[in-house]
Structure formats: C-alpha cells, structure tokens
Amino acid sequence: MPKASELKRGQIIDINNVPHAVKTIDCKSPSSRGASTIYKIRYNNLVTRQKLDESYKADEMLKEADCQKVRVQYSYLDGDNVVFMDIEDYSQYNLSLDDLGEDFLYITEGLEGITALLSDGKILGIELPQVVEMAIVETDPSIKGASATSRTKPAKLVTGLEIQVPEYLGTGETVKINTTTGKFMSRA
C-alpha cells in the first residue's frame, strides 16, 4: 500500500472497489507552521472514464488495485485504438487514444519497459518507463557558448510532444524525458 507521497503517474489505485489511474499529481506545501504537505491527485476512473479529484496528506495510505501486470510493447495504431502486444505470449490488447491521453505522446516504435495493467483479461491502462528517449524534430537553432544552466527554449519531439530544452540543443539531437513530470532530463 503506497503513501500519497509515493504515488506516480499511471499507477492504479482502488477507490471504493473501482480501479482509478493516477493522471496528475500536484504537491502543495503550506507555509504555516505545523501544516503538512497536501497532494492533490486527479484520477481517471478506469470503468466509467470519469475524472475524480482527491486531496491527501503525505503519509495517508492508499490501496493499490488488484491488477495483473504484463510487459507489452507498442505494435501499431488502428484508427482510434492503440494496439499493444504481450512480449511473452504475443496476445494483443487494444486501448483507445482517449484512454491513453497524454501518455501516447511518450510512446515510440521499439520503446521498452511498458507495463499493461489487466483485470479479467481486459486492459485497464499502461505504465510507462520512468525515462524515454526521443529526437528533437523542430526547435530554434542552437546557440554556441550557451551554458547548461541558462535559459530554455521550446522543442518539438518526434511524437508531437513539446518540452522546454536548454538553448545549446539543436534539431536532430536525442534527449531523455522524465515521463512522470514531462520535463527534459539530459542528452541521450
């Protein structure tokens, strides 16, 4: 049973016997003395697809949903459905683009480390690896002499994801992105 402070995006939590996927995590640290850190979590109900917002103190315990975790890889896009293949028995699972949401922007051909969450043989969602590598396809020209700690600029990646990168990076370079925060980590 994870604490609220240990939650990660994509994790499946049991709320009233219904599986909910963590979509966003917002951490608020009140400035008054003795106040505890509050975690505001936005969930997606995996049965009805409705959103649910909850707030927790950092040390509150939550119950993980009873799901089978299977390693899969991205196969192909079939209309509005994304097809994943089980690495071990080659069975296929479909998940709609709406259900994947922004997670689809982190999925590239050959991405390893994707885990599908199954309940009764039906896919509920996926967990992405913590870090993914992608190439920059569009950004302003790199600036010579720009330091690693200076300003950032927007960059568009191969999947259409837009992130902020340091000024010294240019088009064609590969970068590492944290899938939990959606932020640039380093060059690949």
Image: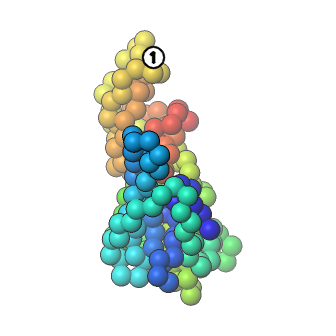
> Is 90 situated left or right of 171 in this image?
right
Q: Is residue 134 visible?
A: no
Residue 174 placement (x, y as % from top left): 49, 37
| 21 lies above or below 89 | above
Foreground residue among 62 and 31: 31
* Position of residue 179 measured from the top left corner of the image (x, y, whole percent): 48, 50
Element under label 1? Answer: loop
Residue displayed at 56% across by 72% down:
63
**Residue at (50%, 84%) from the top-left corner?**
17
Residue at mark 1: 147
Q: Residue at x 45, y 61 (%)?
A: 56
Residue nearest the observer in this picture, 110 or 20: 20
Q: Position of residue 104 (x, y in %)?
A: 41, 60
Residue occupying the far front of the picture: 33
Where residue 103 appears, as percent x and y from the top left, is 42, 59
* Residue drawn at x 57%, y 72% as measured from the top left: 64
Name the kind of residue labelled 1 in the image.
Ser
In depth, the one of 147 and 76 nearer the eye is: 147
| Colour approach in the figure | rainbow
